[in-house]
Image (cartoon, rainbow, N blue to C red):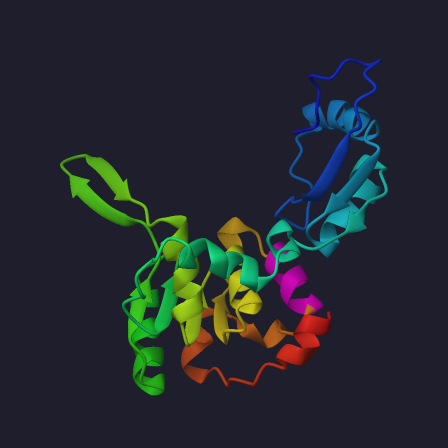
Amino acid sequence: MFLSFLSDDSKAKRIAYAASFGTDDSFISSDKLTACRDLLKRFNFVSVREKSAVKICKDVFDVESVHVLDPTMLLDVVDYKKIFESTSTPNSSGTLLTYILDDDGRIKAKIALVAREKNLVPFSVNALENVKSTSYTYRLPSVETWLRGFHDAEFVITDSFHACVFSILYHKPFICIGNKNRGMSRFDSLLNMFGLENRLVDINDIANYVEKEIDWEHVDKV
């Protein structure tokens, strides 16, 4: 990831767009830090996906960087609609989209609670898992089906960074369950950027969550 395969005299431009550490701290081990620091200093331009990464680049690697948008937000929602509309992807099976990466057994009950309160029908765009003896097989939804899910949803519950991104792109109200195992800095950076900090909740607080209407005009301007 630090382009170590390029020769020292290479004239190739070294550019990082929206690189992500996924954490507030540098994860580089001490034995690799010197080599990574030297390699990163050879870059012509470095940009990062979360605000905290700007500080990591400066303090840990002694490199200047710029905070930019996640690459998926460089496209308009119309561009994503074209992808599933061009393949006649069928409508989703519900109105409450759930995309949970790390279910600890408590989330399904919380989803059911929100569904009852909002009179919505839950559906998922996760991979379907089939267990055969000791092996696991997964049936992945198509990209078109995944994108269609956000288009059809009236509300989204997720612990995924990119599900938050697409909820914002599609102007869908959402609840983001904090996922510490996958790093909180990306969530904090994204939601703070748009003034949506209140959308990030602990799983135990979902029942007490007070929803505030999102100012989508402000979000689009940002």
Tell whether 105 sits left or right of 132: right
Is residue 190 within the magenta segment? yes
Q: Position of residue 116 (x, y in %)?
A: 30, 83
Q: How many marks?
A: 0
Quadrant containing the N terminus in the rendered view? top right
Nearer to me, 207 or 31: 207
Q: Is residue 26 above or below residue 84?
A: above
Which residue: 56% across, 63% down?
A: 77
Nearer to me, 21 or 130: 130
Quadrant containing the C terminus in the rendered view? bottom right
Nearer to me, 192 or 121: 121
Q: Is residue 106 among what the camera can see?
A: no
Question: What is the quadrant of residue 31 in the picture?
Answer: top right
Tell whether 127 sits left or right of 210: left
Q: Is residue 94 above or below residue 90?
A: below
Q: Position of residue 13 (x, y in %)?
A: 80, 28
Tell whether 208 sits left or right of 38: left
Q: Position of residue 208 (x, y in %)?
A: 45, 84
- Majority SS type along the magenta span: helix
Q: Position of residue 140 (x, y in %)?
A: 32, 46
Question: What is the quadrant of residue 121 in the picture?
Answer: bottom left
Is residue 218 within the magenta segment? no
Q: Which residues are magenta?
A: 185-193
Q: Is residue 168 among what the camera can see?
A: yes
Q: Is residue 63 above or below residue 191?
A: above
